[in-house]
Amino acid sequence: MNEIITFNILTLGCKVNACESAAIEKSLLENGFSAAEGENADLFVINSCSVTGTAVAKARHAASRFRRENPRGIIALCGCFPQSYPEEAGLKFDADIVLGNSDKDKLADYVRDYIENRVKTVKVNPLSREYCKESAVPDEDRTRAFIKIEDGCDRFCSYCIIPTARGRVRSLSCEDIAKQAQDCFESGHKEIVLTGINLGCYGRELGLTLYDAVKAVSESGVPRIRLSSLEPEMMTDELIEKLGEIPALCPHFHLSLQSGSDDILRKMNRKYNSDRFSHIAEKLREVFPDCSITTDIIVGFPYESDEDFQKSVDFAKKIGFAKIHVFPYSIRKGTIAAEMPQIQPSVRTERSRILLAEAEKLEDAFLRAQRGKTGVALIEKPQSELYSQGFTENYTPVRILNEQIPRHTLAKVEIIGAKKGYCIGRILQK
């Protein structure tokens, strides 16, 4: 390339995609590309998600907008959507380069080829059984560093296309995890988040468990370690107790419930029931007394009756989730659930509205319960001259009034009040 190609990246979906987008950005920069300063770029990379129809619609809308504003620009569609639906992505999506998950790390080469030949490229190859290692990319703009330690899922939930998009479970070695954690810590990050497609399955093919990964990170000396989303069936009593031995592990656990109805859980092909989930929540609170538990719930799944939905609402109240991500069921072609009798979209929308209202009440209750407690907030950045904001160990958002505290600071605070969506804190020690 004779002239520098500028690029922007749109990341859709999960934290794993965010990690991989950072790796794509690093690769492009190392290959002589330049990050665009605004929206106007030569190359628009969409690191896609196939979990919901909404994510796919966002990708289409973003591509259409870029094409209108940059008719001669290059659109690269990468990741889970092409891997899950290669024909649709290749033939029906307005993109010049289409790459599955096996090839998106080679994007720079494909862009060079496209610039030279101006021929549309579609590469969606089978996923490797080997772990594709992306190094963590320390980012000064973020207070937390994310390390992807696992990829793939073998669970085959009836609604989910992810096993097709991501392949079988494969894990990063503890040695590589420790090295990446050390690099992130030395770059100034005081919290490391471990992420994966099915994080709780980490190490299964290596004879290891999630505990081994967390322990490897803790040996770097980083003050805080956080886990991203976890599947409940992987959280055994033994694993929870072992995790409790690591002081740096933050007491915040995102357990994907999906439904409070055992009948619906069976139809979803989930590997637990409501009693088992309750036990896991109780065990976590026994080992981590001040922990927060957050979750995902799908509403309007095929066969979900009014009674089934009410069980989800009642169960959410019983557990006392700190936060609930509510998802109206999204039909994904190629899954078992797509062939089941479907609930009317209007019913899904109404159930989503009802559960979101209950979720807001539960979040308010959780925040009020933090009053009078002390914690250590990792300051993200001063929001204005009026306050600084951060998150405590159990992921309570806290605003510290009349303080300009530098980002990356670990500040000891007392929670003195609760507002809508956050708590008010008083500084005790920096």
Image (cartoon, grey):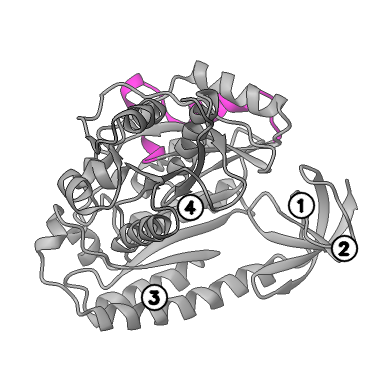
The x, y position of residue 230, in whole percent, is 42, 46
From the image, tell me which residue sits under label 3: 313
From the image, tell me which residue sits under label 2: 385
The x, y position of residue 165, in whole percent, is 26, 42
User: What residue span does the magenta drawing correspond to?
Assistant: 197-223
Q: Is residue 219 left or right of residue 50?
A: right
What kind of residue is marked 1? Lys
What kind of residue is marked 2? Glu
Judge whether residue 65 can be spotted in this image: yes
Q: Earlier in the sequence, mark 3 or mark 4?
A: 4
Q: Is residue 304 left or right of residue 371?
A: left
From the image, tell me which residue sits under label 4: 254
What kind of residue is marked 3? Val
Disc 2/disc 1 C-alpha distance (Å)? 11 Å
From the image, tell me which residue sits under label 1: 381
**Label 4 secondary element:** strand
Q: Earlier in the sequence, mark 1 or mark 4?
A: 4
Q: Residue at x 21, y 63 (%)?
A: 331
Circles 2 and 3: CB distance less than 8 Å? Answer: no
How many other residues sit within 10 Å of disc 3, few (<14), some (14-19) or many (≥20)? Answer: many
Disc 2/disc 3 C-alpha distance (Å)? 40 Å
Q: Earlier in the sequence, mark 2 or mark 3?
A: 3
The x, y position of residue 415, in whole percent, is 78, 63
How many other residues sit within 10 Å of disc 2, few (<14), some (14-19) or many (≥20)? Answer: few
Disc 3/disc 4 C-alpha distance (Å)? 18 Å
Circles 3 and 4: CB distance less than 8 Å? Answer: no
